[in-house]
Image (cartoon, rainbow, N blue to C red):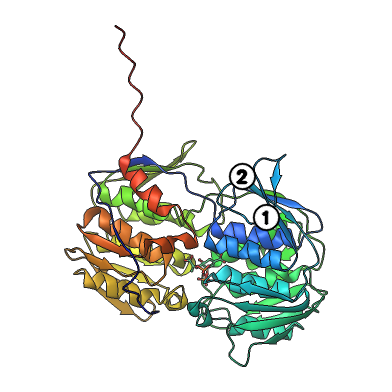
Amino acid sequence: MTERSESLAFWPAPPAPGGVDATVTVPGSKSLTNRALILASLAAEPGWLRRPLRSRDTLLMADGLRALGIGIEETVSSSATVSGAPGLHGEAWRVIPAAPAGPAAVDVGNAGTVMRFLPPLAALAEGPVTFDGDPRSHERPLSGLIGALRALGARIDDGGRGALPLTVHGTGTVDGGPVTVDASASSQYISALLLSGARYNQGVEVRHSGGRLPSLPHIRMTVDLLRRAGAQVDAPESGGEPGVWRVAPGALLGRDLEIEPDLSNAQPFLAAALVTGGTVTVPGWPRRTTQPGDRLREIFTAMGGTCVLDEHGLTLTGGGRVLGIDADLGDVGELAPGIAAVAALAEGESVLRGIGHLRLHETDRLAALSRELNALGGEVTETEDGLRIRPRPLHGGVFHTYQDHRLATAAAVLGLVVKDILVENVATTAKTLPEFPELWPEMLRGPVPAARPVARA
Ligand SMILES: O=C(O)C1=C[C@@H](OP(=O)(O)O)[C@@H](O)[C@H](O)C1
Ligand SMILES: C=C(OP(=O)(O)O)C(=O)O
């Protein structure tokens, strides 16, 4: 866990007056936006991202790419273009690729996607590119990726740390070819190498060797977007060798991509329906998607909700009972903090497995969740690869968030039904959902009542 700061503001989590009844429009996916930005930057022609997520993680990615000379323009409509720093407005980003070039300095914040997806692209730049970020970024795993990039021909100076800060000394090209990496600490190593691999001289063949690979849907998302950009990719799920991914060398197409809503960020809103016995609809929920958040339909159904996916989007209705769950969340680790919050409010015990790698996320999520839930009267123990949660009557208090957006949203879910929860630093939700502190009370206000006809005299 990173240092707690008592000086950060405390947000009184609003209690639910009863079953929530709301439609919540969730902004675009972080994982899709940051992959689409990388692929569009490496393309042979300009491309568009429609409804991109604008949050700390994606603005850092856009700024990092701009520092390397890539054009990313904020558009207010498809005909009018506003250049310059992106704000939280506008409907699309137009990406104008350029040969990446240093010298440049990239701030990765605490974004796994930026600290892992950008160095392989920077290896294609001519000139040095330095990477640094929040103190926690120095602790997050990177050594496997650094080793793999070196094996593919990149020169990287990391001062022997195997972590940030580091400098990539690019020469304009990367040999590429076969490489073996232990990606059990983060699936993002594999995604990172594949995303830039088409532009390496020999393409790339990435072989995972090591413990269990987490977050497989995120690797499938990478493969899917690469194929949509015209890359030739062999992957285990399409008949390839298990644990091996190949991207052939070649040009990428500039695409016009509509970014799906972030289904993992939909989680707290759906959880609100579940724990209050209400109903929440998330419009635009895709029928088919590679996002891991789609697993919420199955997980929250097992925990007592009813899910309907139709032309209105995904509607979750709570049944008045919240059930414990025994689940392997290794594929969908980013959902675990929100599931833990619901599990703490359930009727029976839950065991969340396959998520040991969460110790290396924005904070040590297993330690943070058990510590904070226990401080409110819960009974949560860490297992080797997850959490065991025995629901107990919870009481109010401060929920520390350790600069982790998903801890803040998990605390807000608790606050719906546990009085007097104070969420430390709710602004940390800006990592992927800056609108959270406004969207949450808006959800609680429910549907806007239909205007009453004005009585005639
Ligand atoms: O590739 C991605 O977009 C992500 C992959 C996962 O990372 P890990 O495999 O490190 O868990 C996930 O937890 C993260 O939120 C986003
Ligand atoms: C683990 C997460 O993020 P990152 O992309 O920084 O790894 C997350 O969003 O839950």
Q: Can residue 325 be seen in this view?
A: no
Residue 309 falls in which quadrant of the image?
top left
Q: In which quarter of the image is residue 13?
A: bottom left
**Cα distance, mark 2 to mark 1?**
15 Å
Could you tell me if the residues under marks 2 and 1 are in contact, i.e. CB atoms within 8 Å? Answer: no
Question: At which x and y percent is residue 71?
Answer: 74, 58
Please give left or right for residue 378 compared with residue 53 in the image.
left
Q: Nearer the viewer, residue 236 or 58?
A: 58
**Residue at image x 51%, y 53%?**
262
Disc on the earlier residue, 2 or 1? 1
Residue depicted at 56% across the width and 72% down the height = 187
Q: Looking at the image, is 57 positioned above or below residue 356?
A: above
For the residue marked with disc 2, what is the amino acid?
A: Glu
Q: How crowded is mark 2: few (under 14 residues within 10 Å), some or many (20 or more)?
A: some
Horizontal relation, residue 278 to residue 134: left or right: left
* Quarter of the image with the N terminus in it: bottom left
**In this rendering, the label closer to the viewer, 2 or 1:** 1
Tag 1: residue type? Gly
Which residue is the site of mark 2? 91
Question: Residue 392: x and y, percent?
Answer: 18, 66
Crowding near pointer 1: few (<14 within 10 Å), some, many (20+)? few
Residue 456 location, quadrant: top left
Q: Mark 1 points at which residue?
A: 84
Q: Is residue 56 left or right of residue 335?
A: right
**Is ligand 1 less than 8 Å from the beta carbon at label 2?**
no
Choose between 23 and 79: the one closer to the eye. 79
* Residue at x 57%, y 85% (from the top left corner): 163
Q: What element carries label 2?
A: loop
Q: What element carries label 1?
A: loop
Position in image of residue 366 (x %, y %)? 36, 75
Please say whether residue 112 is visible from this viewpoint. Answer: yes
Residue 32: image x %, image y %? Answer: 59, 57
